[in-house]
Image (cartoon, rainbow, N blue to C red):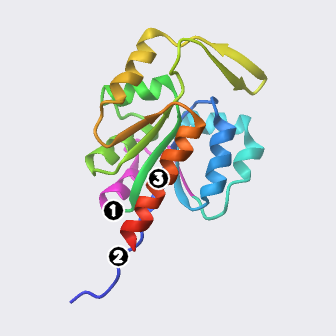
Amino acid sequence: MDTASPKPQRLAWALTGSGHFFTESLALMRKIGDFDLFVSKAADEVIRMYKADFDALPDTIKVFKDRTASAAPVGRFYHGDYHTLVVAPATSNTIAKMVYGISDTLATNVFAQAGKCRVPSIVFACDTAPELDTMAPSGMVKVYPRRVDLDNVEKLKSFEATTVVESMEALEQSLMSRLQCATASSS
């Protein structure tokens, strides 16, 4: 009889190339403290713009960067390493790829694998209203998402085991709820 206790599952977080609420997402990551971070190539570019904020993340975070053609780190989903995937913030490009099943970045690949492994996902979509104010590295800018971007967000809301949030408050609330569920199920 195997008496070894199962290894605890972790949170997985995927970053895309969005600057929308990027620093706020990093602040939320600092509050969580212990998870695996999947960084797409586009996110790696954005991180350089917000370097000081990224460097302040806790040492307990494992970082996987998009460096392999087959996105090798996604195999961790098949080993039951994760209880939840967060994709935040998510660009309209990432949302479109998720909706149409395209898995050609680390972020879209972990989303696909989470779905295939029945790991619940929380996606913080950036383009959710016809007109938005967003903080760019150079200051506040106005953004006008296209109809196709708004339609794709609505389509993603119908995906099983996927919660789409449209604000930092909703992201934090959904994340805290999932963390409580994960803690309760591991007890």
Location of mark 1 (residue): 80
Task: Say what secondary structure mark 1 lies in.
Answer: loop
Q: Foreground residue, 14 or 104?
A: 14
Q: Which mark is residue 177?
A: 3
Q: Is residue 124 at all visible to an observer of this figure? A: yes
Q: Position of residue 144 (x, y in %)?
A: 58, 11
Gap between marks 3 and 1 measured at Cα: 20 Å
Mark 1, Cα crowd under 10 Å, few <14 / some 14-19 / many 20+, is some
Find the magenta span and give its range. 62-80
Q: Is residue 15 at all visible to an observer of this figure? A: no
Instruction: Give the residue type at disc 3.
Output: Ser
Gap between marks 2 and 3 measured at Cα: 22 Å
Pick the quarter of the image with the N terminus.
bottom left
Location of mark 2 (residue): 6
Gap between marks 1 and 2 measured at Cα: 10 Å
**Is disc 3 in contact with disc 1, using a CB cutoff of under 8 Å?**
no
Q: Foreground residue, 93 or 8?
A: 8
Q: Position of residue 98 (x, y in %)?
A: 36, 31
Instruction: Give the residue type at disc 1.
Output: Gly
Residue at position x 33%, y 51% from top?
119
Mark 2, Cα crowd under 10 Å, few <14 / some 14-19 / many 20+, is few
Q: How many numbered dots are placed on residues in this image?
A: 3
Instruction: Give the residue type at disc 2.
Output: Pro
Q: Position of residue 9 (x, y in %)?
A: 41, 65
